[in-house]
Amino acid sequence: MNLRAVKGMNDILPEEMGKWAHVERIFRQTLELSGFREVRTPVVEDTSLFVRSMGEVTDVVEKEMYSFSRHDDELTLRPEGTAGAARAFLEHKVHSKEPLTRWYYIGPMFRGERPARGRYRQFWQAGAELYGDAGPVSDAEVIDMLAHLFTALGVKKFDVVINSLGGAPSRARYRDALIAYLTPHKASLSAESQRRLDRNPFRVLDSKAEIDRKICEDAPSILESLDDDDRAHFDALRRHLDALGTRYVVDPRMVRGLDYYTRTLFEIKGEGGELGAQNTLCGGGRYDNLIGDLGGPKTPCIGFAMGLERLLLATELPTEPRSNLVYVAPLGEAALPHALRLGRDLRARGVETIVDGKGQKIKNMLHRASALDARFAVLLGDSEIERGIVRVKDLRTEAQDDLPLAGAVTLLIDRLAAPVVGPAGTASGGPGPGDAGTP
Ligand code: HAM
C-alpha cells in the first residue's frame, strides 16, 4: 500500500499553520474592509459548468481537470472558484436581492498540472468576485486593494500588470488580426498551437512553448483593436490607478488562459523570496458576459484569485512567537483531580493548557513539556497537595518556585503576561495569554 500523499498534493502540518492563518487573517480583514463577505461553495461541480465557463479550448479544461462519473453525474473537482461562485450567485438569485454583491472565498483547487515549486495539483486560492458593477472605478479599487494587501502580507517586490481584452466586438476584431498574423507562421508553431489557431487563437498567446512565444513577440497588440468604449474604460482605469498612486505596467499581450474574460485583466507578479519560475501570485479580470452566458441576467463582474502556496514562498513572515502553553504534570493519585481542575480553570481563563495523563516520572513529564515548547510546567505531587501548593518551573529560565494551589491560576496568568527575563537578565516581551498562538 502506498502511504504517500498524491503527487502534487501537499500536507500542511501544524507547525506551518501559523503562517497560513496569518495570511488568511490579513486577507479576510482587507476584503471585509472593502465590503466583501465570505462564501463557501462545494469542491465538486458539474463538469459542464467548468467547460462552459472557462472555455473548451483551454489548458485547464483540455488537460488538467480531475473529472469523474458518479450516480449518472459527470463531476469535476473545482480547478478554480469563479465558476462555482457564479453558479451559486445564479442559483440563489442573489442578483434579485442586492444591487451589488461582493464575495470572497478561500479553499483548495485542483488542476492536474506538472508539479514544480509553486505549481501543485491541489493548491489553495484566496479569491474574490464582485457582481453588478461595470467599473472602471471598481476595477481600480480592486487592483489598488490587492497592491495594499500584498504589501501588508510582506511581499517585498511585486509588479502589477494590466491589460484590456475589450468587449465582444473588440475581441472579434483582435481575433481576426491575430489569425491574420499567425497564419503565415502556422507551420512553425507547436502542434498544440496549430490546432488552437482557428478555434481559439488567444490561447496561442499564452502558450508556454518557446517557439510560440518567439512568434508571439511580434503579434499585434490588442490595445489597437479596442473600440472607443473599451478604450475609454481602460484609459479611465489607468487614470484612477494613477490618482491612487498604484504603480502598474501595461502588457498588451497578457491574455490570461481562461475564456470568460472581457475588458480589464490583471496579474501580480512576485520576485525573490523562495519564489521560482511560478511567479504569478495573483490573477484576475473582468468577465461581464459569464452570468448572462450561464442563463442569468446580464451582470458585469470582476474578480481575482491568488495562490496561497506561492504567496507564502514570496513573503518573509515574522517568526512565530513562542508558545504560552502551560503543561500540568500530576504525580500521584491525590494530585490528579487537582491537576484536572487546574487545567480546566486555566483554559477557562484563555490559557492553552495540557494536563499530562501519562504520569509516572517527573523527568519524563518535564521532557514532554520541553518538547512541546511549553512556557511553564506545573508540578503537583501528593506532598505538594498536602501542603496546598504547586511547584512551577519556568522552562525558559529553568527557575522554580512554589505557588499556593488556590491562587495558582491568577498567578500563572500574571507570569505569562510578564516579560521573559533570561538567565543573563535580558528581557523579551511575550504575548499575553489572550494572544496565545497568534503570530
Ligand atoms: P488563474 O490565473 O488560473 O485564475 O489562477 C489564479 C492564481 O492561482 C494564479 O495566479 C496562481 O497564483 C494560483 N495557481 C493557479 N494554478 C496553480 C497551481 N497549479 N499551483 C499553485 N498555484 C496555482 C483563476 O483561477 C481565476 N478564477 C481568477 C479570477 C477570479 N478571475 C476572475 N475572478
Image (spheres, grey):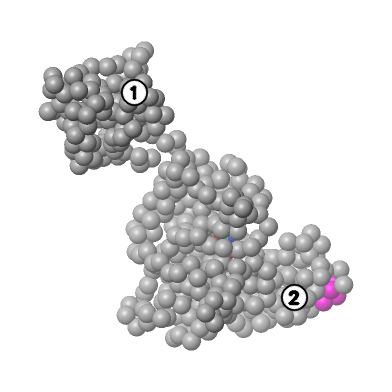
Q: Locate residue 275, reporting x and y percent.
A: 61, 46
Residue lying at the far front of the rendered structure: 333
Ligand 1 is found in the corner quadrant, namely bottom right
> Residue at 64% across / 63% down in the picture?
112
- Nearest the viewer among 89 and 401 is 401
Element type where label 2 sits in the image: helix
Res 428 label: none
Please say whether residue 56 is visible from this viewpoint: yes
Residue reaching furthest to the top: 424
Residue range in magenta is 181-186
- Relative horizontal placement of residue 203, taking residue 6 as reference (left or right): right
Amino acid, disc 2: Arg
- Judged by depth in the image, the label closer to the viewer, 1 or 2, is 1
> Residue 196's mark?
2
State the residue position of label 1: 361
Which three-letter amino acid code belongs to the residue tagged 1? Answer: Lys
Q: CA distance from mark 1 to mark 2?
A: 71 Å
